[in-house]
Amino acid sequence: MGTVTIEQVLVATQPVQPGSLSAFTSRTMRAVKRSAQYRAYKKRPRRITGFGWLLRLSPIAFAAVVVAIVAAAATTTYAIFLLWGKPAAHLQETGQNQFGRQQAVINFENCKYFKRDSAMFEVKAGVTLDQPELEKIASARCERDQIVNWVSQTWPLSQGATRVERGETVVIENITATTLSFYDSMHQQHLTLPILTDSRVIIEGADHPLSELKQGDVVVVAVASTFPPGGHGPAIKREVQAIIKLSLPFEYYTSKQTLLTERKPCTGNPQSSCLSNNGLHLYPHFNHNTKQATPETIWEIQGKLVGHTAHSLTLQGSGGEMYVTHTPFDIVNDHNQHWKSTYKNTTVELGDTIAIQYTQPASADHKNIADDEIQYVTLLAEQQIPAGTWVKY
Amino acid sequence: MMNEQKIINDTLNGKPDRYADLVERYHTGLIIHCEHIVGDRDDAEDIAQEAFIKAFDKLANFDATRARFSTWLYRIATNTALDFLRRHKKQFSVEDIEALAAATEPTYLQDAERAEVRQAVINLMPPEYRHVIEAYYWKGKSYKEIAKELNKPVSTIGSYARRAKLKLKEQLSWVQ
């Protein structure tokens, strides 16, 4: 190591920040977007479509491509994804964040679930995941989302008596030419459903014969349920509409999904980051005087609870900024006295992570939230399976 | 380690919003670098922003085989700061400015060195010293913002920072 100054060393040791954009970055990107270069970069490179690219190869390269295609077609490992692009997740970087948890930035291909090509995650407290595990858990989320979207688009919900449900992730217990048996994902209900002549079997994004499925395969089952006239009451008939094979072991779509929580810029407050997680509902418990809101006008803050009074909650956001929420009463004491039994006596304490969703304020001062702007106040909890076992985040 | 080459490739090929990752990663150090040169925080932020925009415009010309992105970016910022000083007709010597710039050029540490530095900061006493170091060098806050948080004069924050750095240098013998 050559000579370095203390300033250089301190800057070089800056911890990886959670998925939030500073005010400086937001301001700079607004200026960047006004530049002509932004528009130039935004144009995607010209894609060579069809087989035109083959004609541009040298004879040797052309021959190599032909050999590769013939060899691949001769094996059973070559798969064409006809129905959707195969999702993939690649770890960009991982390390420990300021909250003492492992965090990871993962890049995606063919993944619409996260609505962008890259996402930041926090790992469950006390857990460390290596690169293969991180990538499998993230890609499993994308894969399942791809499949559920395909089912929804292929069999859109209708007003008729029959509708196709989006599909549970299950393990095949038994499969014949005419029936499929499995336990539901919580292993509480055992089902045997008829397979129809036109039931589809999808493996690696393409239609395959039923004979390629076997006991133990992890699948999504799209079930067509027919309801009585008027639509009231349980389904009178349930049949398999499609069976879609998944690529990873069962736990990657179920229990391991609780290990990763996405952290992203808070809606309306990108200078702070928010976890995409649920928790214990603290407020309101009854109708209260809240401004009308649509999903587009609901903003969010999250942070450590640093104070509460008879008429306020104060949170410290991920970047250290303070948010004050004015409340009609002391929400924390109210929960601890009257509502904690709903959540196995889990109380709210200073230092807990709280999320507040509120109506987009009319004023610019989003760090002070009026009590009639509050939509929900939530005590964040770790994702748990089975649901109902509460562990604070 | 952030895959910078991928971010640059994505930026140039249809995803220019990826550039925000580079801005977020480097803006704290770059603003400190500019502040060392021009002596004013607000001016430093303007210069740093101008440097990021210039780097964005010239990104297609960046050659990763010749330098790291940060080295290239900081060079743009130093030149922008020199232009600023000339525009405001401030008396300065280029050699002095280059020496100031060198003191805050980016450097890269091994994991063990980073851990040692972080532990030394965590162990800093009194706690105000630690707060100032974390807020200024790791969270990108100005002395003015830190002064408001701690309810102290800006000059006191500067004094805390100087004393904190002296203490850290005592702990970290390999630092100049």
Image (spheres, coloured by chain):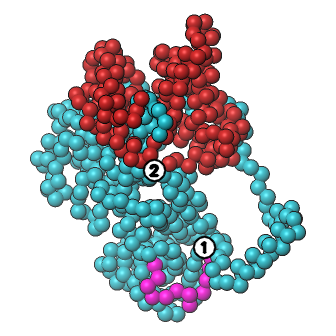
Chain colours: A cyan, B red
| Residue displayed at 34% across by 42% down | B116
At 59% from the left edge and 67% from the top edge, which residue is drawn? A86
Q: Check the residue under mark 2 and report the chain it is in.
A: A
Kindly tell me whether residue B54 is visible in this rendering. Answer: yes
Which x, y percent locates residue A356? 32, 41
- Give how far across and how far down residue A318 sits, in percent: 35, 39
Q: Secondary structure at mark 1?
A: loop
A331, above or below A185, in the image: above
- Number of marks drawn: 2
* Residue at x 22%, y 28% (from the top left corner): B126
Relative placement, left or right, of A274 versus B83 is left
Residue of label 1: A205
Q: Secondary structure at mark 2?
A: strand
Mark toward the viewer: 2 or 1: 2
Residue B159 in picture, x, y percent from top left: 32, 17
Using a 10 Å C-alpha cutoff, classify the residue at mark 1 as few (fewer than 14 neighbours), some (14 to 19) or many (20 or more): many
Which residue lies under the disc numbered 2?
A120
Q: Are marks 2 and 1 in contact (CB under 8 Å)?
A: no
The disc placed on residue A133 is none
The three-letter code of the residue at mark 1 reads Gly
Viewer-proximal residue, B85 or B151? B85
Using the image, determine if residue A340 lies above or below residue B27. Answer: below
- Please, which chain is the residue tagged with disc 1 on? A
